[in-house]
Image: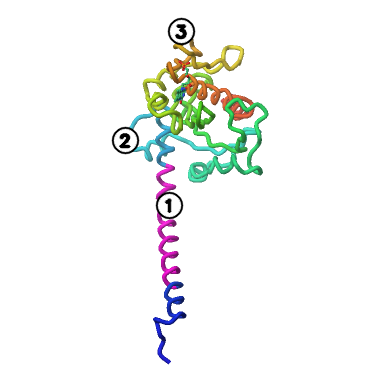
């Protein structure tokens, strides 16, 4: 008996085949794009790390491979969980922070992040002679309206800021564009996070920091609160529930 494509069965078979072909096409495209998206994410992260560490050059991948040692660390004891670059770069920190099995509720949530992942990526930056020149760490915390994400680099005294870059935020456009400008982030360079007694003193100062204030960063009029969000982030991430244990282990190593 000849198959009648205009029958009810024919219509169902045609629809099923069409769905199957379309789903293969969508899955295939998603798979191809997944690799591209990952590559873009890695390259963006590398660029931000280099900017925070004040390393300039056109070939981001080459510079990163030469100068940066990425690490995945356990924040509770400062131990290293992975030194494999792709594992570190592809670590999904946001998912880890959401999952209750891989995160904690901070006791002192200065950055207002609600949950903190148990692991984090850090980047040791090496100079031409193979010596540690800075350590770059991702930070994030609540601004006025949104979570502000960035990277901060400290010199080998683990106190002096080498550089900072804000990679993502959802604060008011226009008013808070300064967060991502080098005019503002450059004012962080050379500032000290802690005083001589080890007390965290870094502060975004409303109206501008006084000349010679080694802990003060200029607040920007009309949008000081977003800047203060970054200040609170620094306070949290350089504290006990942030990178403190890891940085102490680096100090001992040094
Ligand atoms: C519509 C609107 C959006 C605002 N967005 C921000 C913002 O994203 N970040 C911020 O710090 N302040 C923002 N502000 C200003 C603050 O609410 C606050 O008034 C301001 O920070 C106070 O001024 P100061 O920064 O000079 O202290 C906004 C104000 C308005 C009216």
Q: Position of residue 15 (x, y in %)?
A: 43, 72
Q: Give the range drawn in magenta.
A: 17-42
Q: Do the residues labelled 3 and 2 touch (CB within 8 Å)?
A: no
Question: Which residue is found at the position 46% from the left and 7% from the top?
Answer: 210
Magenta-highlighted stretch: main secondary structure?
helix
Q: Which mark is residue 58?
A: 2
Q: What element carries label 3?
A: loop
Report which residue position mark 3 lands on: 210
Question: Which residue is found at the position 44% from the left and 7% from the top?
Answer: 211
Look at discs 2 and 1 and give the one toward the viewer. 1
Q: Is residue 52 above or below residue 34?
A: above
Q: What is the CA distance from the residue labelled 3 to the residue labelled 2?
A: 36 Å
Question: Which residue is found at the position 50% from the left and 45% from the top?
Answer: 90
Q: Is residue 252 visible?
A: no
Which is nearer the N-term, disc 2 or disc 1? 1
Report which residue position mark 1 lands on: 35
Q: Is mark 3 within 8 Å of ligand 1?
A: no
Q: Is residue 88 above or below residue 134?
A: below
Residue 39: say if magenta.
yes
Camera-side residue of 240 and 19: 19
Q: Is residue 219 left or right of residue 196?
A: left
């Amino acid at each position: 008996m000849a198959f009648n494509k205009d029958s009810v069965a024919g219509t169902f078979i045609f629809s099923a085949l069409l769905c199957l072909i379309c789903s293969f096409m969508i899955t295939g495209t998603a798979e191809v794009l997944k690799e591209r998206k990952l590559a873009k994410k890695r390259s963006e992260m590398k660029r931000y790390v280099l900017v925070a560490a004040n390393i300039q050059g056109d070939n981001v991948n080459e510079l990163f491979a030469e100068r940066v040692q990425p690490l995945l660390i356990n924040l509770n004891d400062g131990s290293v969980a992975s030194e494999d670059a792709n594992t570190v770069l592809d670590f999904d920190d946001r998912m880890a922070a959401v999952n209750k099995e891989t995160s904690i509720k901070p006791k002192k949530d200065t950055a207002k992040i609600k949950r903190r992942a148990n692991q984090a990526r850090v980047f040791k930056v090496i100079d031409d002679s193979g010596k540690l020149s800075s350590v770059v760490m991702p930070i994030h915390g609540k601004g006025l309206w949104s979570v502000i994400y960035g990277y901060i680099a400290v010199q080998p005294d683990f106190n002096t800021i080498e550089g900072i870059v804000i990679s993502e935020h959802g604060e008011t456009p226009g008013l808070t564009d300064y967060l991502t400008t080098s005019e503002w982030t450059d004012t962080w360079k050379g500032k000290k996070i802690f005083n001589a007694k080890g007390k965290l003193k870094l502060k975004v100062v409303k109206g501008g920091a006084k000349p010679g204030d080694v802990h003060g960063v200029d607040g920007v009029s009309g949008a000081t609160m977003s800047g203060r969000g970054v200040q609170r982030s620094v306070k949290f991430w350089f504290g006990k529930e942030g990178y403190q244990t890891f940085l102490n282990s680096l100090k001992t190593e040094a």
